[in-house]
Amino acid sequence: MRSLYVLLMMMGLCAEALAEGCIVHSQDDRIEVKICQQNRSIPGELFRTGFCQPALKDQKVEVTFIEQCPTGAFGICRNAQVSNMPYRQDIHYYGVASDARFLQPACEQNSAGEWTTE
């Protein structure tokens, strides 16, 4: 299960450009995950063609581009830094609120982000 949460954080490294976001909805036989990545500083084309195009083995993945992430997230990793890059994004998490116990420390320690709730 822990690897799932690491995967969620890695998926969260997708981002969007100013007033640009993407909803990544993935599922397999056991797990369904929905996140939204709101771009802060990633170049738009890079965001659309790379960051919001996760390749998740054995999972059905659907990506929808939107202007702004919807409300209703149980947690948001604000100003998360994309690993080894100068880019920043906000990652909105939807679904199982108890997952915050794994996602919050990863947000703060691995992404130098600020965990908030709506």
Image: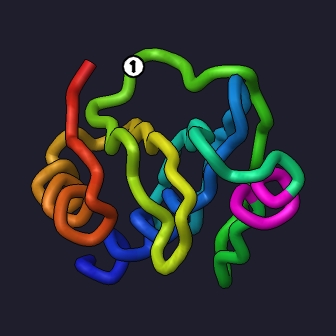
Please name whichever residue, 82 or 11, is drawn nearer the observer in this view of the structure: 82
Q: Which residue is mark 1?
A: 72
* Relative vertical location of residue 15 with respect to residue 70 in this rendering, above or below: below
* Relative vertical location of residue 67 with respect to residue 91 in this rendering, above or below: above
Q: Residues within 10 Å of mark 1 (few under 14, many from 20)?
A: few
| Segment tinted magenta in the rendering | 46-52
Disc 1 marks a residue whose amino acid type is Gly
- State left or right for residue 117 relative to residue 70: left
Helix, strand or loop for disc 1 = loop
Please name whichever residue, 114 or 36, is drawn nearer the observer in this view of the structure: 114
Number of numbered discs on residues: 1
Query: Can you tell which quarter of the image residue 107 is in?
Result: bottom left
- State left or right for residue 63 relative to residue 5: right
Chief SS of the magenta region: helix
- Can residue 24 be seen here? The reply is no
- State left or right for residue 51 relative to residue 99: right
Which residue does the image show at 28% across and 51% down from the upper left? Answer: 113
Q: Magenta stretch containing residue 111, yes or no?
A: no
Which residue does the image show at 39% across and 44% down from the upper left? Answer: 79
List x then y, in percent, for residue 109. 18, 67
List x then y, in percent, for residue 43. 77, 51
List x then y, in percent, for residue 63. 76, 47
